[in-house]
Image (tube, helix red, strand yellow):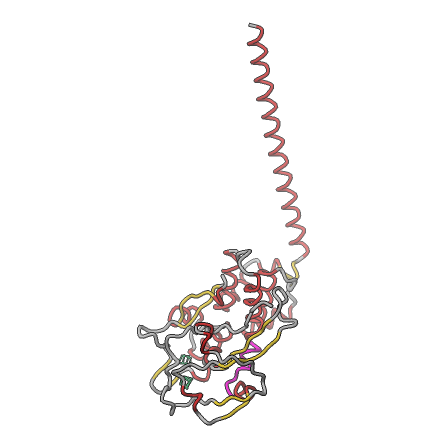
Amino acid sequence: MADTSSNMFGYDKNPSNIIPTKYTLDSKIKFRCHPGVSCFTACCGNIDIILTPFDILRLRRLLNITSDELLLRYTTPTYIEKTDMPGVKILLDEEGRCPFVTDQGCTIYEERPSACRYYPVGMANFHQAGDEGADAEKFFFVVKEPHCKGHEEDKEWTIREWRADQGVDLCDEMNNEWMQLVMRRKSYGFQANLSEQGQKMFFMVSTNLEKFKSFVFESSFLDTYEIDDETLEKIKNDDVELMFFGFTYLAGALFGAKTLKIKKEKIQAKVQEIKASQGDREKEAEKVYEQLVADRDALMQELQSDNKK
Ligand code: SF4
Ligand code: SF4
């Protein structure tokens, strides 16, 4: 059994804070977080808050800024889940606090990142290495850190109710395919590194949909892949559709999944190119061979004339 937990939001920093119990959607927990708790906003610092593509989309809409501005002002690069897949996390201020926290609480609460919504309930998937998702055993776990007084509150909910209240189901729906890419990479281990080009592609789709859109519509992308008109229309006008299309593209580009069809003429051109390069290599080898024969003959002649002397 390989541990490919789909929790990617930093709880593994200190596993001793995880209650050693597997929870289901119907399990009950006692927890409440509100401005009246003595620890209010204590958890909004010294923490790695990785941003998913959907988090970035939400945040840039709320703040009305571009992905470039968001990345520059509020994030710092990181690698996701100890893989070689590059992403971003929130850039904390000099005191180690989240830039969105004030004494009154979170200033982006309605659009807060997935990691902040999940806390303190994480979700994990365990499955056989190389078998992404199919027979995954899914369960929930609860993080109980000493500073968090929310666990001392009287409010009791099921995990299902807690998740609905926090808007976690929508996050899961939006993040799932992207998380699957990370999990697939993680399950491969480091036998094979992601190429530099692969890393750049993953980073672009994950953090900057405007750039990915330009890549699709302004490069040779559409000369290479067969994309139907309906899909083109959708991804041109809807960023969520564009994001999902990006995940589909990454599954093919990084893991060879046959998700997008390459145009026939592109394949034929590639075959010709390979044949031509093989032909060139053969010609080159012939030349080298002829040169070796000529050198050998010259040497033989030299030896023969030396013998005659
Ligand atoms: S985004 Fe909001 S909830 Fe999340 S750490 Fe920052 S202030 Fe806290
Ligand atoms: S530490 Fe716990 S109770 Fe306190 S603000 Fe954070 S989540 Fe809420």
- In this orientation, does residue 246 appear? no
**Residue 193, can we see it?**
yes
Give ligand 1's quarter of the image.
bottom left
Instruction: Report which quarter residue 290 is drawn in.
Output: top right
Residue 191, compared with residue 159, is above or below; it is: above
- Where residue 69 appears, as percent x and y from the top left, is 40, 70
Question: Which residue lies at the image location 59% right of the left edge and 14% below the top edge?
Answer: 301
Task: Give the position of the C terminus as an image quadrant.
Answer: top right
Q: Kindly give the residue lying farthest to the bottom in the view shown.
A: 154
Q: Decide which of 256, 272 is in the foreground and name it.
A: 256
Q: Residue furthest top?
A: 309
Which residue is found at the position 54% from the left and 86% from the top?
159
Q: Looking at the image, which is closer to me, 91 or 209?
A: 91
Q: Quadrant of residue 148?
A: bottom left
Q: Residue at x 56, y 69 (%)?
A: 3
Q: Quadrant of the N terminus?
A: bottom right
Which region shows up in magenta?
A: 165-174
* Rendering coords of residue 110 (x, y %): 46, 84
